[in-house]
Image: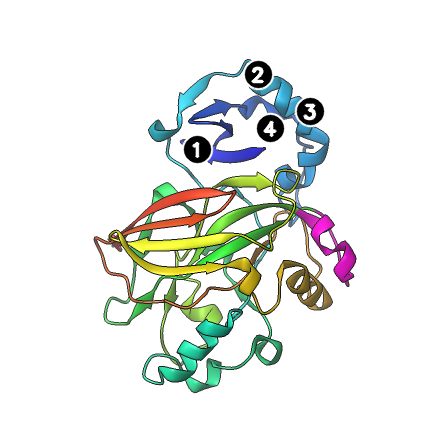
Amino acid sequence: MRICFFNDQRLGLVDNNQVRDISEILKELPAHAYPYPRHDLLIAALPELHDKITALAATAPAIALDQVTLLSPVQNPGKIVAAPVNYQKHLEEAIEDTATFSRAHVRKIQETGLFLKATHSLVGASEGIELQLLERRTDHEIELAVIIGKTCRNVDYEDALAQVAGYCIGLDITIRGPEERSLRKSLDTYTVLGPWLVTADELSDPSQLEMTLLVNDEQRQHANTRDLILDVADLIVFASKFYTLEPGDILLTGTPEGVAPIHPGDKLCASIDKIGTIDVEVKPIVS
């Protein structure tokens, strides 16, 4: 299945070039009182709702895909966990470019570890990126985003992919500088997720996915997830040693070489095999 949120928080099932409005299914989610759970209730319930979603979509109203505003397909992640320098060629370009990449942040991922991005940085593809601190260099980074589907801790490699609800395209927008990554990457709109969630039953093997990012029709990044230093299962194992992973948690798996600056007015087009394409506008922040 391909699940999306669109327009005014409507829930949709993507069917070719249409979106089936299945918002009624949200009434099936359990009610909660304060204190509210930290995880995403829809992501947690997807396996048990699968058949109901399929049945509802068969008769649900359809809207042309190019007529909807695509929001983040995950609305309530407890955390966004990200992997730095997880492609060898990106590590090499960072080592060579001493003017852009702080030496304190250019180490192998096994030494650096993972980092967290603030959840308020999350937007959907149609919402766009609002650049802030325009005097600083800000770069694009395309990444495969993994959405956790189960509560888990200390996961074994063989069981890691069974914890996944699905996959999205992610853009990890980054201000360059000496500060910690979590600060420079957590500005509002600096995590783009979309265009929808492709459930793990539809994409069972994330290890051979081509990805491409264009800026104003110029190719900037092109790689394959087979080139990850730590693959998706390795990253889940690594992250679950430090954090309890919960439904809706987003794991950004790292960006390949080719990162470069973006500016207001730029148009980004990011594609990943078996997931889709997102078109994202870069805008100056509106005060």
Mark 1 burial class by Cα count in 10 Å: few <14, some 14-19, many 20+: many
Q: Which residue is mark 3?
A: 51
Dot in front, 2 or 4: 2
Could you tell me which quadrant the N terminus lies in?
top right
Of helix, strand and loop, which one carries label 2? loop
The disc, 3 or 1, on the residue closer to the chain's N-terminal end is 1
Alpha-carbon span between mark 2 and mark 4: 17 Å
Q: Which residue is mark 2?
A: 58
Residue range (magenta)? 150-164
**Where is residue 250 shown, x and y percent of the image?**
57, 54
Mark 3 burial class by Cα count in 10 Å: few <14, some 14-19, many 20+: few
Instruction: Tell whether position 273 is magenta.
Output: no
Of helix, strand and loop, which one carries label 1? strand
Q: Which residue is mark 4?
A: 26
The disc, 4 or 1, on the residue closer to the chain's N-terminal end is 1
Residue 76 visible in the shown view = yes
The disc, 2 or 4, on the residue closer to the chain's N-terminal end is 4
Q: Quadrant of residue 99?
A: bottom left
Identity, as a three-letter code, of the amino acid under mark 3: Asp
Of helix, strand and loop, which one carries label 4? helix
